[in-house]
Image (cartoon, rainbow, N blue to C red):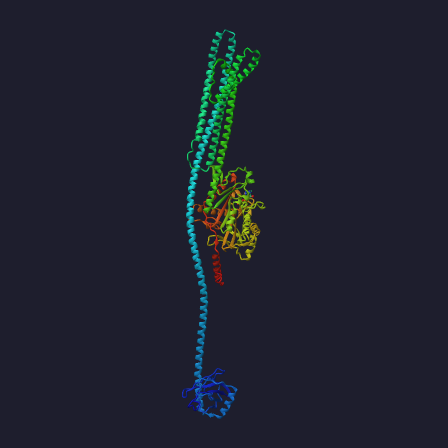
Amino acid sequence: MYGNSSGAENGSYSLTFLGKKVGRHRAVAPAGKQRAWETTNDCSEDPVASLRPGRVPAAVQVDLPGSVPELKDERPCPIIHNMQFNHYENTAAGSSDSQLLDCSDADQATEDERSQNVKIYIPYNSAELCITQIAEDMEAMKRTHQEMLQELEENFQITARENHESTVRKIRSHYQNKLNTLRRILDIYQEKVEKKNLDWKTRVVALTAQNEQLLAEQAAEKRRSKEEALQWHREKSKMLELFSNRLDALHNHQTTTLQELQMARQEVGKVQEMLMASSEDQQEAAEEDETSENKRQIAACKESDLPLEGAKARLEELKESLHQRERELTELLEAERSPVPAAPQPPCTVLLSTVIHKAHVLCSSVAQTRALLDQMVEDNKATLVEARERLQRAKEDREDRSSDKEGSDEYESIFSLLQETVREYEVSQIALDLIRTGECPVLKDGDAASELEDTVGQESTRGNTEGAKSVGQQFLVLQDQLKQVKEEKKKIIENYTSERTMRKKYYNMVEDMKGKIRVFCRIRPVSRTEAAQGGTTVVEKIDDYSVTVETPRGPREFLFDKVFSGDASQEDLFHDTNRLIQLAIDGYNVCIFAYGQTGSGKTFTMVGDKEQKNPGIIPRSFNAMFDIIQDNNTKFDFKVSAYMLELYNDRLQDLFVSQAGEAHAQPQSHGQARRVEIKRNRKGVVFAQGAETKEVSNAQELYALFQQACANRHISATKMNVESSRSHLIIGIMVESRNLTNGSVSTGKLSLVDLAGSERAAKTGAKDHQLKEANSINKSLSALGDVISALSAELPHVPYRNSKLTQVMQDSLGGNAKTLMIVNISPSECNLDETLTSLIYATRVKAITNNAQRNVESKEIALLKEVIMKLRSGQTVEEEDA
Ligand SMILES: Nc1ncnc2c1ncn2[C@@H]1O[C@H](COP(=O)(O)OP(=O)(O)OP(=O)(O)O)[C@@H](O)[C@H]1O
C-alpha cells in the first residue's frame, strides 16, 4: 500500500506530520496481510476529518527503510501536508511485532539521519490511494474506538449497576440482619411473654380456684356464724330468761319469807302476851291451896295451848316455805352441776360462761350461808348442852349448901347467871332452828316451859330480827347479783354490737377485694339556715357503717363502707382515704368523687374551707402523694403531671387557661376556642385531649396550679349556698414511676372530682343564667344516675355517651379504676327527699364492680416500646438498644 511492501518485517515507525511527531506506529507482520493502524492516544485533533477527500495534501513523503513494513496506525493523524514514515530497524531479529520503541531524543536524531538516506517519492495517485486507505482505516479505527467506547461505557454502566446493586444488597443484608436480630429478640420476648402469660394464666386459674374455695369457705363460715349467732342469741335469751326468772323467784321468796317472819313475830308476840297472862294467873293462884293450884295450872296450860297451836301452825308454814326455798336452791345447784349440752361454740360463749360462773358463785354463796347456819346451830347446841350441865351442877351444889346461909347469896347470883346464859342459848337455838328449818322448841316441864316461854317472848323477837336481818342481807346480795347480771347483759349487747360492726367491716373489705366501689357517707352539721328553720334532724349515724333516716314511713337504714357524722374532722375522713393515694402511685387509676345535693358539703369535703384552715381531700392528697414520693425516691424515679378541668354548661374547659384570657384570645384565633375532648386509651383510661398538662415536682407547685384553677372556676351564690359550685371540677394527676432496680415502669392516675350539686330551682331561687347552669348540672347528674342504675342492674348497655360528665367518669364507674364515692348529706328534715335520693344512689353505686388493673410494664416492654417509637420516627436503632 505504501510502496514496496514485500517481505515485510516487524518494526516501529513514528509518524511525522508537518515536521511534528504525532504518534508512534507499529509495523505488524506478516507481510501480505492487510495493514492496520494502531495508535496511541496522544493526538488531540480528529485525524479522520482531516483526511476526508478534497482535503488531500499536495505531496506525501514517505521514508522507507529498505523494505516498507506493513503499517498499523496506532492513532488518527491531523491533516497531512508532509508525511514521513521513519523506520527503525529492529534491534533484535524475530522480536515480537507488538514490541514498541520509545521515542527518545537520541532516537529522533538517528531517525532524521536515516530518513535522509531512505527517501521514496510516491506518485500522487498512489498517495491518494494510500491516504484514502488510511482514511478508511482510520474510519474503521474510529468505529472500533466508538465500539470500544460504547463497550467501555456499557462495562462502566454494568459495573456501576453491579456496584450499586452490591451496595444495595449489602445495605439490605445489613438491615435484614438487623431486622432478623430484632425479630429474634421479638420472638424471644414473645416466647417469654407467652411463657409468662401461661404462668399468669395458671396462677390466675389457681388463684381463681383458691378464691372460689375461699369464697365458699367464707360463705360457709358466714352461714355457720349466722347460725351460731342465732343459736347464741336463742341461748342467751333463754339463759337470761332463766336467770331473771330464778332471780325473780328468789326475790319473791325472800319477800315472802320476810313477810312470813313478820307474821311469825306477830304470832310469837301474841303467844308471849298469853304466856304473861297465864303467869299472872299462876301468881294469884299461888296463894290458894296446892290442889286448886294444880287444877288452875292445868287449865291455864290448856288455855295457853290454844295460841301455841296457832304459832306451831305458823312455824309449820314457815318451815314449809323454807323447805320450798331450799328445794329451789337445790334445783339451781343441780342445774349448775348438770353437764352443759354440747353445743357449737358461738363467739360469745365466753360471756355465757361468765354468766354461768356468776350463777355458780351466787349459789355457792347461798350454800356457804346454809353451811354456816348449820354450823352455828351445832355450835349453839353444844354450848347449850354445856351450859345446861353447868346449870345442873350449880343446882345440885345449891341444894347441898342450902344450910350455908353465907354462901347461899353468892351461889344464888351464879345460879341465876347460869340460868340466864342457858336461856340465852336456848333462845338462840330456837331462832337458829327457826331460820333453818322452822321447827318449834319442845317444852318439857312446866317451869322450864314458863321460863322459856317468858324468855322466848323476848328472845324470839331478837332471833326473828336477826333472821330478818340475814334475809335482808341476802336480798341486798341478790340485788347486787341482779345488777351484775344486768351489767353482763349490757356487756353481751355491747359485744354483740361490736361483733356486728366487725362483721360489717369484714364484709366491706371482701366487697372491696371484689372490686366494688367504696362509698363513704358524710353527714354535714346542721347549718345556720337549717337551725333557723327549726333544725329538726332526721339522719342519725348508728355505727361506723350504718346510718338511719327517719322517713314518714318509719326509719330506713343504709349501709356504707364508712359513715362520718357531723363532728368528724377532715383528718378523720382523709385517714380512710389515704390508702388510695398509695395505690395511684403504685400504678392504679384511682378516682375520688363527692356526690350530693347542693350545699351538702361536697366542696368542703374535697377542697376544704375558704381559708384552708380545714383543707379537704384535694390539698391533702397533694401532700400525701409527694410525701410518698419523697420516701421512695431512692428506689423509683417519679414524674408527676396534672390537668385541671371544669365541666360548665356541658362544655369542658381547661382551668389552666383563664376564661377571660380565652375570651380575649378568641377573636385573634378567628373564633377557634381551645377544645378539650375526653378520650380513652387502649386500657380504657380516660384522658383529656386538648387540655394543658403541666409537670410538677413538688406539692407546693401542684397546689399553686390548683389555686390558679380554682380562681378560674365558676362559683356563685344561691339561696342554698353562698358559694355554690356551678360546674363539675375534674383534676387528673398522672404519676409515672420507673423502678430503679428492675426498670419496670408504672403509670397511675389520681382523679379528684368535685361534682356540682343537684338543685331545685324553687329552693335555690335560680333565675336566668343560673337556671341554665342548674339545668345543665341536673341534666349531667341525671345522666350519671342513669349510668349508675344501668351498672348496678348489670344492664348490657351503659349510657356513658349521654353526657360529658359520664364520659369523664367512664373509667371510674364500671371501668379500670379504684373508686371512692363520698356521698354528702344534710341531716335536716327540710332536705329529707334529697337526702333519701342521694343515699339510694350511693347504695346503688356500692353494687357496681370495677376491674382495676395496675398499669405497669416490664423493663423489656418499656425498652421495646422505645425501640418502636424510634423506628417509627425514623431514627436508627442499634442492636444494643434492643
Ligand atoms: N362537715 C362540715 N363541717 C363544717 N361545715 C361544713 C361541712 N360540710 C359543709 N359545710 C359548710 O356548708 C356549706 C356548704 O358546703 P359546700 O359548699 O361544700 O357544699 P356543696 O355540696 O359543695 O354545694 P354546691 O353543690 O352548691 O357547691 C359551706 O359553708 C361549708 O363550709
Against 51, residue 211 (above or below) is above
- Which residue is located at x 44 percent, y 37 percent? 346
Residue 290: x, y in percent? 49, 7
Q: Is residue 335 above or below residue 572?
A: above
Which of 222/470 is in front? 470
Q: Decide: is 96 above or below 188.
A: below
Q: Where is residue 531 in the image (x, y as percent from the top left)?
A: 55, 38
Can you give x and y, in whole percent of width and height, for residue 368 in the image? 49, 27
Residue in front for this viewpoint, 199 or 677? 199
Tell me how many marks there are.
0
Examine the rendering and report whether any part of residue 755 can be seen.
no
Residue 158's place in the image compared with 121, above or below, is above
- The single residue placed furthest to the left in the displayed view is 32
User: Ligand 1 quadrant?
Assistant: top right
Q: Which residue lies furthest to the top in this view?
A: 289
Q: Which of 531 and 811 is in front in this view?
A: 811
Can residue 179 be spotted in the picture?
A: yes
- Residue sitting nearer the eye, 345 or 48: 345
